[in-house]
Amino acid sequence: MLTRPLALIRPLLLLILLPTLAWSQGLRFTTLDIGQGDAAVLIAPGGCVALFDGGPTGSGATIKAYLKSLGVTNIDMAFVSHMHADHMGGIDEVDVGTDAVSIDAVYDHGGTYNSTAYDDYASHFSGRRNTVRRGQSFSLCGQVTLTVVAANGNGISSTDENTKSVTVKITYGAFDALVGGDLTSTPDIESTIINDVEKLELYKVHHHGSRTSSGNVLLDAANPTVSFISVGKDNTYGHPTQECLDRLTAHNSAIWLTEDPAANKLLGHIQLSSSTGDTFVVTQGTRSVSYASKGGTTGPDTTPPSVPGALVASAISSTEIDLSWNASTDNVGVTGYRVYRNINGGTYALAGTSTSTGFADLGLTAGVTYGYRVAAVDAAGNESSPASASTRTPAPGLTVTSPNGGESWAGGSARAITWTAQDISNVKLEYTLNNGGTWQVIASSVAASTGSYTWTVPNSASTAARVRATDAFGPASDMSDGTFTLTAAATPARVILNEMLANEPGSSTDGEFVELVNVGGTAIDISGWTIADATSVRHTFASGTVLGAGKAIVVFGGASGIPSGTPNAVVASSGTLSLNNSSDTVTVKTSSARNAATIDAYSYTSTLASQDGVSMNRSPDASATGGFVLHTSLSSRSASPGLRVSGSAF
C-alpha cells in the first residue's frame, strides 16, 4: 500500500508495485460499459491493476462485477482524471461492501470541487489520496509504464474542470495507449502533450467524443490505430459528435463504442489484450479484431485488404440509395469500409464509412445518377482497390385525375378526389374556391398509395374551384387542370363548437376562448344561448345576437385576452370561462333552463390542452363531423380565433 504523499516523491520516480493477481496473463485494457461516463481497467501481465476513473454514481457494482470475474480483489492504483461526477461518482463504491475491491491509493490533480460526488470521494479516500504532477511515472509489476503527460491544464489557466484532466500514457513494449478523461482541444490542452505522446495503438477518446476534444493536432501526432469511446446510448449531449468521428476516421482509426446512441444500442465492454505488445486483439461481444502495433517486431503491415465483392447500388427512393457488398479479407483484419460517391459522373468524394457490408446514402436528389466506389481499410490504414457501381434516383411524380376541370359538384355531397403518385409516401389535399387565390386544407396527410380520398364537398357556390395534391414531405405538386363548379343548397342553420383554447397563452385566463361556427346555409338567432363548462354556465349570449351562415363568433374569458383584430369576439358574461387544462366538458345549449336543448358538446383531455397557447380545432376546419386535433397539426399557427385555421376570414 502506498502511504507517502506524492509531494515527497521525485517527479520521475518509478514505483514498483507488487502483483495483486496470483495468475499470469498478457496486458489487458478494458473500457467498461457504464453508460454516459468513464471507467477503464488496466491489468499488467504480472497481475497489477490500475483503475482509470470510476463512472457516475451507481457504477461501482458494474466495475466490481467485471473485476471479480477476472479474479481481481485489489487495485494497486486508481487515477481520477477530474472531479466531474460522471468520472468519479462511483469510485468510492468500488472500495466498499462485502464484495469490495480494495483500492490502495488514488491519484488526482488536487484541489477541491463543489459537489456531493466530490465530497463522498474526498471523505472516503482521506489518507489514500495523492496529487499528481506532469512528468511523474509509475509502473505496474515492473512491466507496464504509466506516465502523467497532463495535469491541471499543464500551465494553461482555465476555470473549466475538463481542462484539468489527468492524462496518462501507457507503454508496454511496442504498445502505447493514452487515457485522458475529458481533456480538451478548446482550450487547447491537447497540444501541450503531443511531444510526450507520439504514435499510439490505443486512444481512449477524450470527453466521450465531444466536439471540443480529439483535435487534429493531437490526432496528427498520435495517429491511433484504434479509438475507444465510452458513451451512453441515451445521452443528451450529442456524444459522440460527428465532428469527432470524422476526425478519427480521417486518421484511419478504428472506432469502438461502449454504446451506440445512433442505434440506441448497448454494445458492452471493449476489451483489448496483448501478449507482448507487438500485436493486440480488441474484443466486444462476439466481435474480435486483431491489430499490429506500429513499433512491433512483426514489422509494419503494408498489405491492403481484398476488393469488396459484388457491390450493388439500389435506389430505395428519390432521396436514398442503399449499397451492399461482400466482405473483404485481410492478413491482419479489416476495420471498416470507405464509401466514395460522385454525381452525374463528376469527381469522387468521401460519402461516409461503414463497419458492416452495407451503407445507406440519404438526402439525395431525385432524378440524378450517383456513382459509388467502396474500398476496405485495415488497422494499418491500408486501403484496397475499390469496387464500383452506380444507379439513378427516381423522380417523384404526382398527378390529380379528378376533379380535373369542368365538373359540377353539389355542396354537401361526397365525392372522390383521385390521383396517381410515384415514389411519394403521403399527400396533402387542398381546395380553392377562387382559382388559387386562397387554399383550404382537406386532409394534411393521406397515404399516396390509396390514390383516392372521399371529400364532403363544402356547401359553397363557386365557378372557380380546384383541388391540389402535394407531396407531404417534398416539393412535388399538381392541381386540377381546369376549374370546376360547386353548387350550394340552402341548408338549415347548424352551430358547432369549432375551436377551443383551454391552456391560455401566458398566465392570464382571459386568453381562454370558445369559437362557434354556423356551418349551415342560413343565419340563426342565438340570443339567450349558453356556454358552460363541467361546473356551471360561463356565458349567455346577449339579446339580438345573430350568427350568419358560414360565420363564427368567439367568446373569450376576459377582454384583455382578445387579440387585436379578432372578428366577432365577445367577453364571457360571467367574467371567466374557467376551462381546465387537465380535462373539461364544454356544452352549448339554447338556454340555461334545465330542459334546454343541447346544440353541441365536447369533452377534452390534457392531450388537447397541455400546450401553452395551442388550441384544439376541428379537422377538417369547420366540419360538423370532424374530430378535434391540436391546431398546430393543421397550420403553422397555434390558434386562429374568429378565423379559419389558415388565418383567412370565415
Image (cartoon, rainbow, N blue to C red):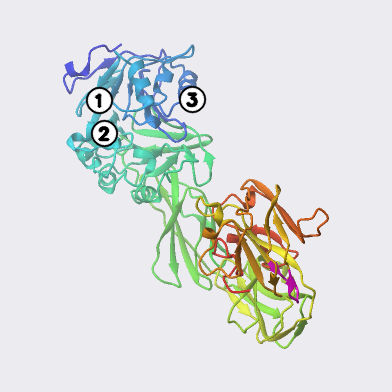
Judged left or right of residue 616, residue 126 is left
Where 420 falls versus 273 (above or below)? below
Q: Quadrant of residue 275?
A: top left
Residue 262 belongs to magenta span: no
Q: Position of residue 139 (x, y in %)?
A: 27, 21
Q: Earlier in the sequence, mark 1 or mark 3?
A: 3
Q: Position of residue 441 (x, y in %)?
A: 64, 70
The amino acid type found where label 1 is placed reads Gly
Identify the residue under disc 3: 62
Q: Earlier in the sequence, mark 3 or mark 2?
A: 3
SS category of the residue bearing label 3: helix
Of badges 1 and 3, the one in the foreground is 1
Part of the protein shown in magenta: 517-525
Q: Quadrant of residue 39?
A: top left
The amino acid type found where label 2 is placed reads Lys
Identify the residue under disc 2: 164
Where 473 falls versus 210 (above or below)? below
Identify the residue under disc 1: 111
CB-based contact (under 8 Å), mark 2 and mark 1:
yes
SS category of the residue bearing label 2: helix
The amino acid type found where label 3 is placed reads Thr
> In the image, what residue occupies the spot 17% across and 23% down?
11
Judged left or right of residue 145, residue 552 is right
Question: Dot 3: few (<14), some (14–19), or many (≥20) neighbours within 10 Å?
Answer: some
